[in-house]
Image (cartoon, rainbow, N blue to C red):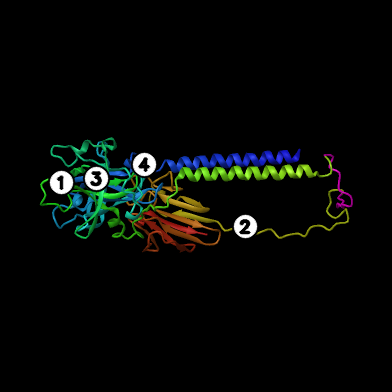
């Protein structure tokens, strides 16, 4: 009977594991995995003077907020040879939902620009980049963007996500123009597509649309896309996060099938082991003790009354240190917060234990975090726009620094001052 109960418990655990795996599979499949879902990574880009419009796409790590947008240099430049410091990135021009981004990197010869948003956002999803050595040229491809946005009399302020156009076609061949790797496309790329992604059937970016690239002497310029390898080889991936596909990628569905098969094999092994034990027997259902077995005799409730010795007394363990964060001024002035493990500070109350109002100047959505392990306290700036300062010195982003009891730090400005005590 006990064996049956054990098997039942094991089967229940395995069932729960399979349910969890199904949720993981659904989560993976919710990421960009095809041409249509790749639209979730596309944006509208307008230069600083609002005289040039085009498309762009988000890069980073799948499932994480994005902060970098790729486009063409000629989309954000004001005139030949000059690229402005900022550009507008529209998530929905119709809803006036946009951010003013910094031109973080640009290359006029390669016609590539990377924009950095003032803070990470979940309004777009990062697209995976597919270099030349992982491309199947016989695959289906598509250019995504706003192909009419560059036309005369087109009011880009009315554009929304629903206006992103998928132009399907193929790649005729890989080519090289002026020392630049490009793809000759079997699809029409119009001005508004400039800077947008050309993706394969998995929604991975193989190139950057660039209408009539370097073909000024031709009446009807063929459509070219800059190979994504040019971007990968030009940027510092330590500061600009990207995800690169490989030719050995395994399908998420295949991973789920293999995991389910392993779970089923484990269930069969457990059942077979339990059946063999049942056949061998354990001396009957009555629970009779095996001959010759000895068991300690314990009577009464007082330790040592059965001839045994009382367990040794142990000293009580010391109470762990407690860390407290005290707001010295500003919006949270006078409030005290306990720091157990890790506490995050910022404007996004859904992700921060200690939250400022959404209109707080200089405070990023996720500004910094404090960690305390019972002995040592550390502070880490999470890549905030205006910085985190400890005892007056600005922290490097994503580099933990030890805080001693009594140290003071502030977010963006001294009016957002805290003191750590432990």
> If you read the primary sequence from the N terminus, does the residue marked by circle 2 or circle 3 appear first?
3
149 left or right of 338?
left
The residue segment tinted magenta is: 285-298
Residue for badge 3: 55
Which secondary structure lies at badge 3?
A: strand
**Quadrant into which the N terminus falls:** top right
> If you read the primary sequence from the N terminus, does the residue marked by circle 2 or circle 1 appear first?
1
Which secondary structure lies at badge 1?
A: loop
Q: Nearer the viewer, mark 3 or mark 4?
A: 4
The answer to whether one can see residue 297 in this image is: yes
Name which quarter of the figure residue 29 lies in.
top left
363 left or right of 80?
right
Q: Mark 3: give few (<14), some (14-19) or many (20+) Cα within 10 Å.
A: many
Q: Are marks 1 and 4 in contact (CB under 8 Å)?
A: no
Place of residue 16 in the rendered image (x, y in percent of width and height, measured from the top left): 58, 40
The answer to whether one can see residue 333 in this image is: no
> If you read the primary sequence from the N terminus, does the residue marked by circle 2 or circle 4 appear first?
4
Residue for badge 1: 51
Q: Nearer the viewer, mark 2 or mark 1?
A: 1
Place of residue 345 in the rendered image (x, y in percent of width and height, measured from the top left): 42, 51
Q: Are marks 1 and 3 in contact (CB under 8 Å)?
A: no
Residue for badge 2: 319
Q: CA distance from mark 3 to mark 4?
A: 19 Å
Residue for badge 4: 34
Q: Are marks 2 and 4 in contact (CB under 8 Å)?
A: no
Q: CA distance from mark 2 to mark 1?
A: 65 Å
Q: Mark 2: give few (<14), some (14-19) or many (20+) Cα within 10 Å.
A: few
Q: Nearer the viewer, mark 2 or mark 3?
A: 3
């Amino acid at each position: 009977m006990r064996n049956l109960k054990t098997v039942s418990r094991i089967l229940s655990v395995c069932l729960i594991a399979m349910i969890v795996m199904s949720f993981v599979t659904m989560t993976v499949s919710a990421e960009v995995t095809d041409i249509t879902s790749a639209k979730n990574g596309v944006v509208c880009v307008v230069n600083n003077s609002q005289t040039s419009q085009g498309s762009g796409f988000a890069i980073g790590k799948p499932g994480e907020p994005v902060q970098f947008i790729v486009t063409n240099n000629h989309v954000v430049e004001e005139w030949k040879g000059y690229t402005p410091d900022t550009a507008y990135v529209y998530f929905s021009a119709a809803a006036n939902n946009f951010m003013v981004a910094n031109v973080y990197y640009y290359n006029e010869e390669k016609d590539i620009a990377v924009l950095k948003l003032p803070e990470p956002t979940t309004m777009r999803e990062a697209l995976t980049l597919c270099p030349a050595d992982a491309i199947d040229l016989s695959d289906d491809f598509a250019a995504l963007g706003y192909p009419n946005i560059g036309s005369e009399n087109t009011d880009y302020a009315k554009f929304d996500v629903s206006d992103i156009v998928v132009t399907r076609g193929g790649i005729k061949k890989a080519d090289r123009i002026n020392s630049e790797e490009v793809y000759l496309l079997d699809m029409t790329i119009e001005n508004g597509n400039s800077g947008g992604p050309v993706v394969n059937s998995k929604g991975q970016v193989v190139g950057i649309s660039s209408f009539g690239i370097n073909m000024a002497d031709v009446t009807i310029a063929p459509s070219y896309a800059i190979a994504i390898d040019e971007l990968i080889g030009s940027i510092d991936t330590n500061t600009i996060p990207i995800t690169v596909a490989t030719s050995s990628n395994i399908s998420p569905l295949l991973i789920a099938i293999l995991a389910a098969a392993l779970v089923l094999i484990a269930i069969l092994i457990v059942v077979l082991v339990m059946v063999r034990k049942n056949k061998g027997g354990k001396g009957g259902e009555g629970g009779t003790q095996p001959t010759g077995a000895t068991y300690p005799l314990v009577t009464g409730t007082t330790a040592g009354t059965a001839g045994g010795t009382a367990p040794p007394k142990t000293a009580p363990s010391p109470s762990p240190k407690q860390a407290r964060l005290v707001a010295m001024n500003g919006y949270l002035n006078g409030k005290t917060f306990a720091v157990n493990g890790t506490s995050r500070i910022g404007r996004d109350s859904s992700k921060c234990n200690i939250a400022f109002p959404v209109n707080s100047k200089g405070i990023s959505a996720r500004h910094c975090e404090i960690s305390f392990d019972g002995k040592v306290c550390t502070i880490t700036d999470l890549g905030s726009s205006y910085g985190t300062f400890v005892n007056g010195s600005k922290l490097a982003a994503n580099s933990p620094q030890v805080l001693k009891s009594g140290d003071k730090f502030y977010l963006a400005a001294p009016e957002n001052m805290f003191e750590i005590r432990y």
